[in-house]
Image (tube, rainbow, N blue to C red):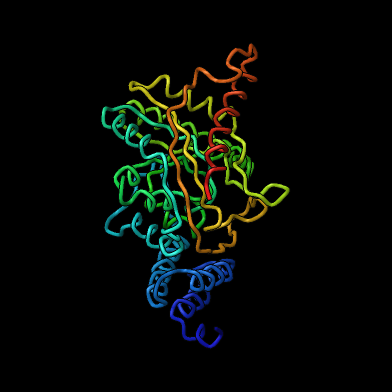
Amino acid sequence: MENNSKSDRFLLELDRSIQKGLVPVKYLEILKGFYLGYKQVAQEEPLTIENLFVTFLTLIQQQALNPFIFEPFHRKIREPFDYYQFGLDLISPLVDAKRSTLSGLNHLKEITASLAKGENAVFLANHQTEADPQAISLLLKDSYPKFAEELIFVAGERVITDPLAIPASMGRNLLCIYSKRYIDNPPEQKGEKQLHNKKTMALMSQLLSEGGKAIYVAPSGGRDRPNAEGVVDVAPYDAQSIEMFYLMTQRAAHPTHFYPMTLKTFALLPPPEAIQIELGEARVAKRADIHLSFGPKIDMDHFPGVDLQDKHAKRAARAEFIWNLVRQEYAKFP
């Protein structure tokens, strides 16, 4: 492996980039580890992988030297460079397509018909890896490619500020928001981040009023991680987050329906065991099967606990009800 790596074009280009200051030195080991692990598991020819990562390195260099500034609502960029397709090309070799599953297509058929009438759909989904948007697109590329391409993701700070994540993020429709976890870091930027979030919410209201929009949101506010027994479980849903989206949709000019969406992608690109505030997490590529399920429409006004008098307890009951819908579906995955 060592002898081969010395003549590897990507590794040579990476070393040159570090030496010239084109890529921050802290990304050297992250990129090298990601690449070497990727080569071992990806189902592609070595030269194809090498060329893919050379392109990836070029995109990272661009971000390190001149970071792309995401607007509160970012529309995917497909030309002159197709960032959407690049994201799929980067993740596709890691996916065991034969063992992957897609379920709930009967619900998705109803959802897309509703979208065509100008109604909106909000998916209250779990979130497991950076590559979840690409995983969704890969699973839907044969049946609902346009839906997958147009899906809007509520995205946190990390995917729009980490140079390694930005190239894939540029290829997606994103409503960019600072989560509660990071809004105080650093403290001097809190006011600016809060203002940004207000702009994002205003744009979301505008999109919903236009109609025909499908929006993915992870009410947990982060990625699922293993529990104390080492088992990956769906992270609990935040009641306040769900309530915010629900109230916003009530003011829209078009009806908005809520649906559970369940993902199992953890093995593909596992997150670090502990939550990191600082950018620069390691990427460990693995080849794995992935799974996606769409559930039936959620009745947001009828659920166990709807009769509770305390509004906070009532919201918490609704959040737990929706969370359990996703957990039950997650338990069905292989």
Can residue 199 be seen here? The reply is no
Residue 193 lies left or right of residue 9; in this view the side is right
Q: Nearer the viewer, residue 198 or 136?
A: 136
Can residue 57 be seen here? The reply is yes
Q: Can you give x and y, in whole percent of width and height, for residue 302 in the image?
A: 51, 18
Residue at far bottom of view: 3
Q: Nearer the viewer, residue 206 or 283?
A: 283
Residue appearing at x 41%, y 72% in the figure: 49
Residue appearing at x 59%, y 59% in the figure: 281
Total marks in image: 0
Q: Can you give x and y, in whole percent of width and height, for residue 218 in the image?
A: 52, 39
Locate residue 173: give its quadrant: top left
Residue appearing at x 52%, y 44% in the figure: 156
Residue 244 lies left or right of residue 151; in this view the side is right
Q: Can you give x and y, in whole percent of width and height, for residue 234 in the image?
A: 59, 42
Residue at far right of view: 228
Q: Nearer the viewer, residue 29 or 239?
A: 239
Q: Can you give x and y, in whole percent of width and height, for residue 217 in the image?
A: 48, 37
* Quarter of the image where the N terminus is located: bottom right
